[in-house]
Image (cartoon, grey):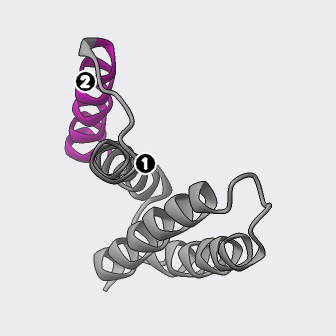
């Protein structure tokens, strides 16, 4: 169940991030309030995932997948540019997540 909760937390974060972008600096109340609610749901499910997943593993997976998917969404929907530096940084973060996941439980 821990990884199911973690998946829900990641979805909540992705939704919250994009609603925050849509809020235009909290000038659009519907999007701003929706972003805050989404983050609340995100942290609730993240807390539930920590009952069965070690914090360092859960946080690295949450952050790594969140960064990767946020970048993809920002590129596709928000038309934000990507360059070699962005891609290299994301690759290194994912590599770190894999290393932590592999060695973190030992």
Compared to 27, does 48 lie above or below? below
Q: Nearer the viewer, mark 2 or mark 1?
A: 2
Q: Is residue 47 magenta?
A: no
Q: Position of residue 5 (x, y in %)?
A: 39, 81
Magenta residues?
85-106
Compared to 83, does 54 lie above or below? below
* Mark 2 lies on residue: 87
- Residue at image position (77%, 74%) is 29
- Residue at image position (53%, 58%) is 17
Element under disc 1: helix
* Mark 1 lies on residue: 63
Q: Position of residue 43 (x, y in %)?
A: 60, 72
Q: Main secondary structure of the magenta part?
A: helix
Residue 11 badge: none
> Which residue, as the protein is rendered here, is positioned at the far top?
85
- Residue at image position (78%, 60%) is 26
Q: In the figure, residue 58 lies in which quadrant?
A: bottom left
Identify which residue, 77 or 34, lies in the foreground.
Answer: 77
> Which residue, as the protein is rendered here, is positioned at the far bottom?
1
């Amino acid at each position: 169940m821990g990884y199911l909760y973690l998946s829900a937390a990641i979805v909540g974060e992705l939704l919250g991030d994009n609603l925050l972008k849509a809020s235009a600096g909290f000038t659009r109340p519907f999007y701003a309030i929706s972003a805050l609610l989404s983050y609340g749901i995100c942290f609730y499910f993240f807390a539930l995932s920590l009952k069965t997943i070690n914090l360092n593993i859960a946080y690295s997976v949450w952050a790594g997948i969140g960064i990767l998917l946020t970048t993809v969404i920002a590129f596709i929907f928000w038309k934000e540019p990507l360059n070699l530096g962005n891609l290299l940084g994301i690759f290194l973060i994912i590599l770190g997540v894999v290393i932590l996941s592999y060695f973190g439980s030992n």
